[in-house]
């Protein structure tokens, strides 16, 4: 195995226990992909010996302990994904005796979310020499300030620091990052003024909810970001009137401003974006709301306006779903065959989920996004000679981590079953491909395939 360049064992739940330290002897390894197995224990320091490695995917396992400093030795590394494990301790940066993640100047992806990482985000983690595109540190136990060195990484497109215990004001220089499209800072203890995002004209998705910002009027940048599709500012200390221009941003789909002190009159009239599908202003101090010609979902409970007789047709007790979802019945034939007995005469699709850690839209009922994905997937698989007859979407939802989950069915060509090679090839392709906007970084998980030819059951 000394000449092995790609090792992909993803979605094998039968693989468990620690990774052997001998993994470090595979000196020619370029891609190490161990997504969603049952590996546990510490990540071996010997991983740092894989000097040719460009992709390290260890996400969705049960690894424990700290992130090895030795990963900082992987100077060719482009993609580091350690998310969805039980890793703890600080994020390693260089010291006098060992390298850290700060010297990975070719890295484009730091995916470290859904762990138990603690302490401050090190000031030395970021520099202007870096090539980072995605910094995803969500749902850890990080505290302290957001380092202003983050604003030096001019290549950044996605920043996810949500679900931590970060405090203090947001660094002012974040607004100098020219390419950021998605910014998640929600569910922290950030304070001071609401950050000024003026000039971040590529922003599509902003979530600053549930922080401890100073009370303030609606920031001017609310109405000046031309590509904004989603604005979530739940519990952020907003007060005063809402500018009508917010609802007329050309691509706005979702506006969530609940649990603030907003007041005055909102008049939708006829001047609102044709893409706008949800306005959530619950628990504010809105005195009047005029729908005009707007006919999509409005949530206004717990506003003074809702006590008025004329509000009866508007202030309906309808809650936005906790986790928005969409069932795409028009895309897939019934999937009852998936669980049928082997002897039945029907095609058995391979089912899995594409889980996107970032995406730049929020209207799950807009079929454009699914058509785009299907039009991307089908030719990709055909080009790589992956044996698939049809790919279709079953359903979608946004989960508790604000990840977009797309449930997909792959149908086998010319027969009722996929063979083992077909299944493993699909998984390999999907765990080694990077989609383009409007979809961001993702990983692929599958369901156990129910049967192979000549077998009554198989766990995949």
Image (tube, rainbow, N blue to C red):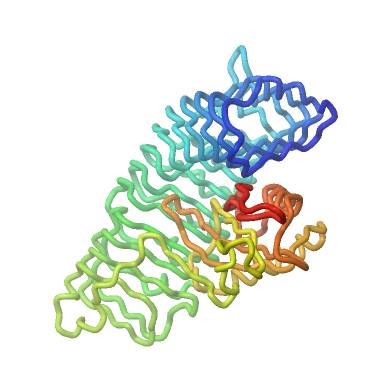
Identify the residue at horizontal 55%, vertical 58% (top origin): 359
Q: Is residue 288 left or right of residue 205?
A: left
Position of 132 with respect to 387 (left or right) is left
Q: Is residue 42 left or right of residue 172?
A: right
Q: Residue at x 45, y 65 (%)?
A: 325
Q: From this view, report whether residue 363 is shown above or below residue 314.
A: above
Q: Farthest residue toward the right?
A: 3
Position of the N terminus by quadrant = top right
410 vs 348, nearest the viewer: 348
**Residue 442 appears in the figure:** no
Task: Give x and y (percent) for residue 310.
Answer: 19, 85
The residue shown at (30%, 62%) is 258
Q: What residue is rendered at 64% in x and 46% in y?
A: 155
Question: Front-most of 457 and 234?
Answer: 457
Q: Is residue 16 visible in this depiction of the protein?
A: yes
Query: Which quadrant of the structure image shows residue 360?
Result: bottom right
Name the spot of residue 275 as percent of width and height, x first: 49, 76
- Residue 279 drawn at (x, y percent): 36, 71
């Amino acid at each position: 195995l000394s000449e092995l360049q790609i090792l992909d064992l993803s979605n094998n739940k039968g693989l468990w226990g620690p990774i052997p330290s001998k993994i470090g002897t595979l000196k020619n390894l370029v891609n190490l992909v161990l997504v969603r197995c049952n590996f546990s224990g510490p990540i071996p320091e010997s991983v740092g010996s894989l000097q040719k490695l460009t992709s390290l995917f260890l996400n969705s396992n049960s690894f424990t302990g700290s992130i090895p400093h030795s990963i900082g030795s992987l100077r060719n590394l482009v993609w580091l994904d350690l998310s969805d494990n039980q890793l703890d301790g600080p994020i390693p940066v260089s010291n006098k005796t060992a390298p850290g993640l700060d010297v990975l100047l070719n890295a484009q992806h730091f995916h470290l979310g859904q762990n138990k990482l603690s302490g401050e985000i090190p000031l030395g983690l970021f520099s202007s020499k870096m090539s980072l595109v995605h910094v995803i540190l969500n749902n850890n136990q990080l505290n302290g300030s957001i380092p202003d060195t983050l604003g030096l990484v001019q290549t950044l497109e996605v920043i996810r620091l949500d679900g931590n215990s970060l405090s203090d004001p947001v660094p002012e220089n974040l607004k100098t990052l020219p390419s950021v499209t998605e910014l998640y800072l929600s569910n922290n203890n950030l304070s001071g003024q609401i950050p000024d995002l003026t000039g971040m004209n590529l922003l599509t998705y902003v979530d600053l909810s549930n922080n401890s910002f100073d009370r303030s009027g609606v920031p001017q940048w609310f109405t000046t970001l031309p590509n904004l599709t989603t604005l979530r500012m739940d519990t952020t200390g907003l007060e005063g009137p809402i500018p009508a221009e917010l609802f007329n941003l050309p691509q706005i789909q979702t506006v969530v401003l609940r649990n603030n002190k907003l007041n005055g009159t909102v008049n939708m009239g006829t001047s609102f974006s044709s893409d706008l599908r949800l306005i959530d202003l619950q628990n504010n101090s809105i005195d009047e709301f005029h729908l005009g010609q707007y006919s999509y979902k409005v949530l206004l409970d717990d506003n003074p306006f809702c006590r008025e007789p004329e509000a009866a047709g508007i202030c309906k007790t309808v809650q936005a779903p906790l986790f928005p979802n969409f069932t795409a019945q028009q895309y897939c034939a019934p999937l009852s065959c998936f669980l049928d007995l082997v002897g039945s005469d029907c095609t058995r699709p391979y089912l899995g989920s594409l889980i996107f850690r970032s995406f730049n839209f929020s209207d799950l009922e807009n079929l454009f996004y699914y058509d785009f994905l299907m039009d991307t997937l089908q030719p990709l698989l055909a080009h790589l000679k992956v044996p698939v007859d049809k790919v279709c979407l079953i359903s979608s939802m946004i989960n508790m981590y604000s990840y977009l989950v797309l449930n997909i069915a792959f149908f086998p060509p010319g027969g009722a079953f996929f063979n083992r090679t077909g299944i493993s090839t699909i998984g390999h392709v999907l765990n080694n491909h990077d989609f383009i906007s409007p979809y961001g970084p993702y990983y692929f998980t599958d369901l156990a395939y129910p049967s192979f030819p000549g077998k009554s059951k198989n766990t995949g």
